[in-house]
């Protein structure tokens, strides 16, 4: 059992806190986002709520889940110890800034979680020391250590593909609803079709997506018509440029 604290208790912290509490860890969350903290405390998982200094004092591993705009006003004044292990999920806050704010703690890492980390299958690119993150979440979620911290920006950009995929699925379900007259069944069909396919796809190395697409989009199939249509429209060719722009917008931030 580990003593784990969360500074900042929002939509990212809450599923991690619940998952860790279910795994038997002693979890303490901060009072920030009072409604979320209260819901966690009343969930019957043994999660405690405390002020920021008490969260740090009573924890060995601390997750920093604050908004980048406010973190620098909160973190440096907390009672850090050399043996603390600190995991940040704050976009755009570099390791060098964390090291200064969390001194004398030196075991630091930065990662990019999504809410479904609670149920598993959430890829976790991580810069810095991946040990604590791997120990806590690596059993159900792929942890992807990065040798270059700057690569996290590219992972943040790539994470927007979730929204892109949802937009495509939404358009397809709306088209199907227009054809069939049943919006509920249309969305259930489209969403579950793609979700079920991905859940049963082995994604343990590069090339798996290309192989799966090739197996579907064989000559004279409907799936090949879709791939050809997206190619002709320029949608596939435009994607790298869109991702470049998103990544560049993050690098340009002060």
Image (spheres, rainbow, N blue to C red):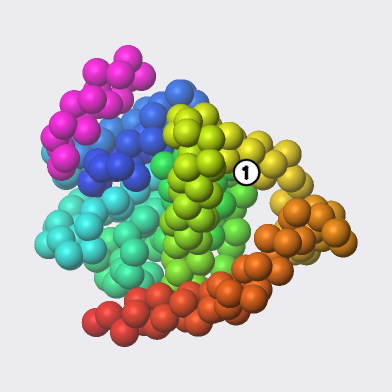
Whether 125 is among the magenta residues is: no
Where residue 20 appears, as percent x and y from the top left, is: 44, 32
Front residue (pair 206, 18): 206
- Tell me the residue at 16%/40% (across/down): 33
Q: Position of 217 compared to 253: left or right? A: right
Magenta range: 31-49
Q: Residue furthest right?
A: 219
Against 68, residue 46 (above or below) is above
Query: Where does label 1 land, which residue?
Result: 194
Where residue 198 appears, as percent x and y from the top left, is: 67, 44
* Element at label 1: helix
Q: Residue furthest top?
A: 44
Against 242, residue 120 (above or below) is above
- Tell me the residue at 22%/33% (across/down): 36
Front residue (pair 61, 184): 184
Task: Give the mark count.
Answer: 1
- Residue 42 falls in which quadrant of the image? top left
Image quadrant containing the C terminus? bottom left
Where residue 142 appears, as percent x and y from the top left, is: 62, 49
Q: Is residue 117 visible in the rendered structure shown here?
A: no
Whether 37 is among the magenta residues is: yes
Front residue (pair 246, 80): 246
- Tell me the residue at 21%/32% (across/down): 37
Label 1 CA crowd tier, 10 Å (few <14, some 14–19, many 20+) = few
Where residue 155 appears, as percent x and y from the top left, is: 50, 67
Q: Position of 116 compared to 123: left or right? A: left
Front residue (pair 240, 132): 240
Q: Position of 245 compared to 186: left or right? A: left
Q: Is residue 188 visible in the rendered structure shown here?
A: yes
- Tell me the residue at 54%/78% (across/down): 238
């Amino acid at each position: 059992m580990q003593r784990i604290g969360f500074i900042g208790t929002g939509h990212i912290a809450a599923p991690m806190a619940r998952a860790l509490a279910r795994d038997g860890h002693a979890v303490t969350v901060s009072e920030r986002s009072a409604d979320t903290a209260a819901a966690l405390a009343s969930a019957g998982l043994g999660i405690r709520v405390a002020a920021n200094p008490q969260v740090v004092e009573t924890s060995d591993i601390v997750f920093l889940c604050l908004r980048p705009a406010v973190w620098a006003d909160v973190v440096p004044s907390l009672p850090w110890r050399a043996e603390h292990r600190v995991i940040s999920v704050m976009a755009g806050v570099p390791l060098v800034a964390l090291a200064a704010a969390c001194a004398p703690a030196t075991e630091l890492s930065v990662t990019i979680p999504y809410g479904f980390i609670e149920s598993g299958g959430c890829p976790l690119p991580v810069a810095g020391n991946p040990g604590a993150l791997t120990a806590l979440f690596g059993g159900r979620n792929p942890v992807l250590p990065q040798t270059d911290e700057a690569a996290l920006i590219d992972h943040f950009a790539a994470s927007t593909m979730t929204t892109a995929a949802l937009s495509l699925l939404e358009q397809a379900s709306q088209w199907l609803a227009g054809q069939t007259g049943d919006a509920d069944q249309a969305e259930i069909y489209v969403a579950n079709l793609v979700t079920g396919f991905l859940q049963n796809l082995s994604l343990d190395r590069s090339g798996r997506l290309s192989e799966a697409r090739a197996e579907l989009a064989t000559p004279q199939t409907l799936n090949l018509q879709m791939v050809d249509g997206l190619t002709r429209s320029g949608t596939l060719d435009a994607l790298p440029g869109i991702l470049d722009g998103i990544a560049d917008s993050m690098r340009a931030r002060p």
